[in-house]
Image: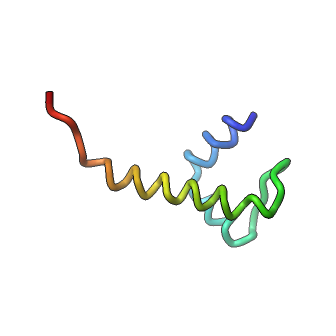
């Protein structure tokens, strides 16, 4: 169930913005945890954008 939520948030980053602005909520997740979840996703998205062009040569 939680993995489904993670997959959904990764495929729909606009929902993170709504969570951040208080326009959406996550069923079963306390409101006080939402900022931490948004922060984690934002960091992951930032890291994935930075690493997108990096590759390893063998």
Task: Using the image as rendered, state which of residue 19 and residue 39 is in the foreground.
Answer: 39
For image coordinates 40% across by 50% down, the residue present is 48
Image-quadrant location for residue 41: bottom right
What percent of the width, then of the height, locates residue 31? 81, 62
Left or right of 10? Residue 31 is: right
Left or right of 3? Residue 11 is: left
Q: Is residue 25 above or below residue 58?
A: below
For image coordinates 68% across by 64% down, the residue present is 35
Q: Is residue 29 above or below residue 36?
A: above
For image coordinates 66% across by 68% down, the residue present is 20
Task: State the scheme by which the image is colored.
Answer: rainbow
Pick the quarter of the image with the C terminus. top left
Of all residues shown, which one is farthest toward the top? 58
Total label count? Answer: 0
Task: Using the image as rendered, state which of residue 9 and residue 31 is in the foreground.
Answer: 31
Left or right of 55? Residue 34 is: right
Of all residues shown, which one is farthest toward the left? 58
Pick the quarter of the image with the N terminus. top right
Left or right of 15? Residue 54 is: left
What percent of the width, then of the height, locates residue 26? 78, 53
Of all residues shown, which one is farthest toward the bottom? 21
What percent of the width, then of the height, locates residue 9? 62, 48
């Amino acid at each position: 169930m939680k993995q489904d939520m993670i997959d959904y948030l990764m495929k729909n980053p606009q929902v993170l913005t709504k969570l951040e602005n208080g326009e959406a909520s996550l069923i079963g997740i306390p409101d006080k945890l939402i900022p931490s979840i948004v922060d984690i996703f934002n960091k992951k998205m930032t890291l994935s954008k930075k690493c997108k062009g990096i590759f390893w040569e063998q």
